[in-house]
Image (tube, rainbow, N blue to C red):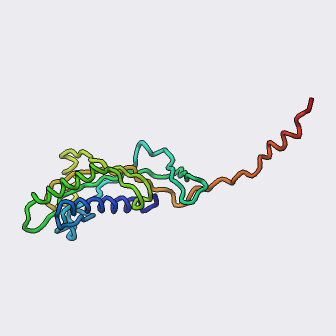
Amino acid sequence: MNADAILRVTQALGARLQQAVVASGDPGTVFIGPLDDQDAVGASLILFLYRIAPNASLRNREHRVAAQTPPPAVIVHENALPLDLYYLLTVGTRPGMSEEPLLRVLGFAMQALQAVPEITGSPVNQEVVRVTLEPLTTEETSRIWALFPTANYRTSVAYLASPVWIDPAQPPEQAQVVLEDSLDVGMRATVPVD
């Protein structure tokens, strides 16, 4: 993917969650951003990217991407950066409403992400990004919520989106096509005949 890979994956995940909100029958929306943002008030779900880390198992591997116009059929990026994106998915707030109806929406969202755990296609440049439920300890959850001292704690779950590749800005240079094997031509002239 390009430098906008983090944005593209976040928007695609937000769109998937919005479909789950609609499927639940809730009239709300999904807010992408900090938990204490004023624009989050009234949202059914809040999606917050709280951590970005290099993917340890892919860190020294090349990133292979199908070419838009072959040849070559595959573009190989030697210095691509594989990332893991960690999201907190939280029920929203609605003035005068309890958390219970929003817990139903959270259940629909979790069901949707479990049923189709991969984000693919044009929103993520034909890549495959897997979304999995990430267990959080009480301590980790407390640390995340401590970032927002004005926000009241609400039911939350964490998800991991991986791998998210950021490819180099310049595409790799392609080798020249071999038109003639000059070594073979020279070898024929020096072979003695019996």
The residue positioned 88% from the left and 37% from the top of the image is 190
Residue 58 placed where, x, y %? 44, 44
Residue in front for this viewpoint, 32 or 17: 17
Q: Can residue 102 be seen in this view?
A: yes
Hey, which residue is sitting farthest bottom in the picture? Answer: 39
Q: Which of 60 and 96 is in front in this view?
A: 96
Residue 189 percent location from the top left of the image: 88, 40
Which residue is more in the foreground, 121 or 7?
121
Q: In this view, does 54 lie above or below 122?
A: above
Q: Quadrant of the C terminus?
A: top right
The vertical placement of 175 against 4, above or below, is: above
Residue under the image location 88 percent in, 35 percent down: 191
- Is residue 53 positioned above or below 38 on the image? above
In the image: residue 99, left or right of residue 132:
left
Q: Residue at x 28, y 49 (%)?
A: 115
Q: Where, by quadrant of the figure, is residue 26 drawn?
A: bottom left
Q: In this view, does 144 lie to the left or right of 168?
A: left
Q: Nearer the viewer, residue 13 or 165?
A: 13
